[in-house]
Image: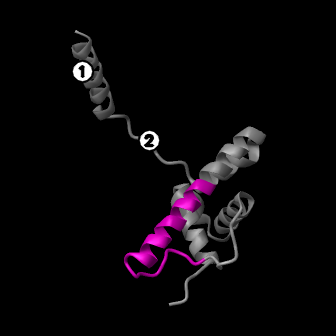
Amino acid sequence: MRDRLFMFGLAALSQLALAPSPARAEVSASQILKMYDAGNASERGIIEANLGGLENGFGWANTYLQSQRKQTPLYCVPDKLALKSEQIIDILRRGVREDAKLGNAPFGLAMLIALQRVFPCRR
């Protein structure tokens, strides 16, 4: 009986996970910067952590591209530089200021493009 109840619960959770969810637009670069500027310390910390995590993921993608595929990375941060969250916010902010269209792009894409412009790779 207990096994059947567990299986039923597992099946129900699986259905919920596979159920279609309403589409949502991603937060734009301008929106995330406005949220950051208007946020309290806790909210700013969450945004910094999200952007830092995204940049860390880009770093792992760069490592994979270089080591496994022998391809040029997405962008090339100098070896001795470890980007801090404040720097990432500043890079995104400057990217949006220099290219207004970037402000309408999803923040992850805008951040990648801004990083590519600040840290281009020599081919």
Which x, y percent locates residue 37?
Answer: 75, 48
- Residue displayed at 69% across by 62% down: 93
Res 91 → quadrant: bottom right
32 left or right of 10 in image? right
Question: Residue 104: image x %, image y %?
Answer: 55, 57
Q: Position of residue 67 (x, y in %)?
A: 43, 77
Q: Nearer the viewer, mark 1 or mark 2?
A: 1
Q: Amino acid at mark 2?
A: Arg
Whole-Å distance between the Cαs marked 1 and 2? 32 Å
Label drawn at residue 46: none
Q: Name the residue carrying label 2.
A: 24
Image quarter in which the N terminus is found: top left
Q: Residue furthest top?
A: 1
Magenta residues, start to end: 52-76
Q: Mark 1 — residue?
A: 7
Going by the numbered disc 1, the residue's amino acid type is Met
